[in-house]
Image (cartoon, rainbow, N blue to C red):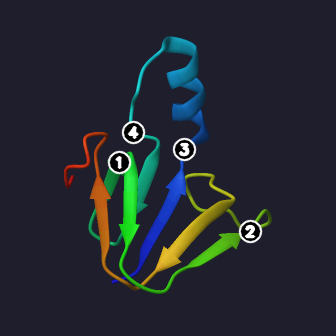
């Protein structure tokens, strides 16, 4: 299953401004989106920069992998 992982810059900016710690990483697959603080990729992946064709969410840089992915919260627990 293909996963796309990206950093949501808007959440990082809001966290800085408001002193919060909301999860800035989004791991997407065809089933659902997971928001998390940490992602472990269990195999090969690639980092993509695509300013002319961003993702639907607006991301210009993301990681793609067909490998297993574990999304973790800020306590290191699986999401």
Q: Nearer the viewer, mark 4 or mark 3?
A: 4
SS of the residue under disc 3: loop
**Alpha carbon separation for disc pair 3 and 1:** 10 Å
Q: What residue is disc 2 on? A: 50
Q: Classify mark 1: helix, strand or loop.
A: strand
Q: Earlier in the sequence, mark 3 or mark 2?
A: 3
Give the Cα separation between the discs numbered 4 and 3. Answer: 9 Å
**Labels 4 and 2: the sequence-earlier one:** 4
In the image: residue 22, left or right of residue 64:
left
Measured Cα–Cα span from mark 4 to mark 2: 23 Å
Q: Is residue 63 left or right of residue 51?
A: left
- Circle 1 Cα neighbour tier, 10 Å, few/some/many (<14 / 14–19 / ≥20): many
Q: Which residue is mark 1?
A: 35
Q: Nearer the viewer, residue 28 or 36?
A: 36
Q: Which residue is mark 4?
A: 23
Location of the N terminus by quadrant is bottom left
Few, some or many C-alpha atoms within 10 Å of disc 4 (few <14, some 14-19, many ≥20)? some
- Which callout, 4 or 2, points to the residue nearer the camera? 4
Q: Earlier in the sequence, mark 1 or mark 4?
A: 4
In the image, what residue occupies the spot 38% across and 45% down?
Answer: 37
Q: Are marks 1 and 4 in contact (CB under 8 Å)?
A: yes
Q: Quadrant of residue 52?
A: bottom right
In three-dimensional space, the C-alpha distance between marks 2 and 1, rounded to whole angstroms, equals 22 Å
Between discs 3 and 1, the one toward the N terminus: 3
Asked if the residue under mark 1 is in contact with the one under mark 3, i.e. CB atoms within 8 Å, the reply is no
Residue hosting label 3: 8
What element does badge 4 sit on? loop
Position in image of residue 20 (x %, y %): 42, 20
């Amino acid at each position: 299953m293909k996963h796309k992982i990206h950093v949501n810059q808007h959440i990082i900016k809001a966290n800085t401004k408001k002193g919060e710690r909301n999860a800035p990483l989004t791991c997407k697959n065809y089933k659902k989106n997971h928001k998390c603080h940490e992602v472990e990729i269990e195999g090969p992946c690639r980092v993509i920069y695509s300013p002319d064709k961003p993702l639907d969410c607006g991301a210009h840089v993301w990681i793609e992998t067909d490998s297993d992915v574990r999304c973790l919260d800020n306590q290191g627990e699986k999401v």
